[in-house]
Amino acid sequence: MIIVILKDIAFLSMISVSLAIIMVIAQKWLSNYGECKIDINGKREITVIGGNSLLSSLSDKQIFLPSACGGRGTCGACKCKVISGGGPLLPTEKPVLTAEEIAAGDIRLSCQVKVKIDIKIEIPSSIFNIRRYHAVITEIIDYTYDTKGITFKLDEGEKIDFLAGQYVQIDTLPYASVKQKVSRAYSISSKPEINDALQLIIRYVPEGICTTWVHQFLKVGDHVSLTGPYGDFFLRDTEADIIYVAGGSGKAPIKSMLEHLQVVGTNRKMTYFFGARTPKDLYLTDEMKALEKVFPDFKYEPVLSASVASDNWTGKTGFLMPYFAEAIRDPKNTEAYLCGSPGMISAVTKSLIEHGIPKDKIYYDSFG
Ligand SMILES: Cc1cc2nc3c(=O)[nH]c(=O)nc-3n(C[C@H](O)[C@H](O)[C@H](O)COP(=O)(O)OP(=O)(O)OC[C@H]3O[C@@H](n4cnc5c(N)ncnc54)[C@H](O)[C@@H]3O)c2cc1C
Ligand code: FES
């Protein structure tokens, strides 16, 4: 009896092992797409090994589409036009595409589309200016208990040209038990006039892969790699009045814009609202206040949403929105630059539109 049972077990084990081997071979065979061609803008053709995402296939060839969420299909930054060869729209793409984009059918998330056959795409020519840079960390400043300013000195001879407000993506290195490397977006906080080094302001996100690495493992002297510059959140060269609104590490791109304006000079009327919870969330306050004496018409207004009596805070409190009216003199001739959490961006945008600022003059980077 026992022998019969053992024979049955051995027979079943053999079948499972054989099935597993057949599945591995089938998988390899099915996902072996060989070489595929990517036609870019009808002007350039690259050859890649099929099977990877369009985003990573392009980045392997040093063509860097923005990918603020690191390819998780949540930010929409990696959208591009796929003329042919992209296959059907995937369920993972729909949540971040607009109804118009879904109807058009050719706007796709390059982090989700796999290159399996020859594919034709269109991307803006500005993408070709985005490069990979290597840098060494030269300074780490603790701005607050959860926010650091980090300076990246580019390798000898490397120079990055960017516009005040744009961002880079830094690539993490494996640390502790985290073996996976990720790429995350950070706005440049230094001015574009310094092009052989960059400063970023990085706020710790509990359990965050990149910010844990930055806050607990990254140190002066470490070598890192980054790509950029990305984004259309940059200071427009006009004479319009400006309202800046930032929260937390959203101060980074505004700092770059103001430092740039200090170099080139400006007479623009500018008001900067910085939202924070308590005094311990404020940083660079003296530096921002000092700019009131540099520019002819500039006001820095920190606003605390959760200050208590013992803080002895005498400045503005509560929501930011009630203070906008006094800062706007000619809404049609006012630009707004917003940076911070998605919730803040949407509430502030709604209020600025109600105050008469044209929607197309409200520029923002949402850190969500
Ligand atoms: C264009 C752009 C510019 C940015 N610039 C800056 C900058 O200058 N400084 C800066 O500090 N950050 C900036 N960010 C945010 C940054 O890219 C990362 O998303 C953030 O640092 C978290 O990365 P992580 O790997 O540590 O967290 P992840 O491992 O990606 O996330 C861990 C968890 O935290 C949640 N989470 C992610 N981000 C946040 C957040 N900000 N607040 C609360 N919960 C969050 C996630 O949903 C997830 O559950 C920017 C984002 C964008 C899109
Ligand atoms: S990289 Fe964020 S959606 Fe594709």
Image (tube, rainbow, N blue to C red):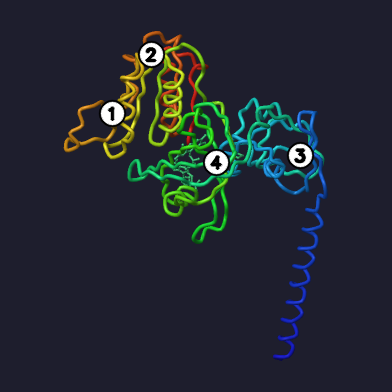
Mark nearest the camera among 2 and 1 is 2
Q: Disc 1 designates what residue?
A: 318
Q: Residues within 10 Å of mark 2 (few under 14, many from 20)?
A: some
| Callout 4 secondary element | strand
Q: Disc 4 designates what residue?
A: 154
| Callout 1 secondary element | loop
Indicate yes or no: mark 3 CB to ligand 2 under 8 Å: no
**Residue at left 45%, top 54%?**
217
Q: Are marks 2 and 3 in contact (CB under 8 Å)?
A: no
Quadrant into which the N terminus falls: bottom right
Tell me the quarter of the picture where residue 115 sits.
Answer: top right
Q: What residue type is labelled 1?
A: Gly
| Callout 3 secondary element | loop
Distance (Cα) linking label 4 and label 3: 40 Å
Q: Which amino acid does label 3 sit on?
A: Gly
**Percent position (x, y) of residue 55?**
67, 41
Checking the image for residue 87, the label placed there is 3
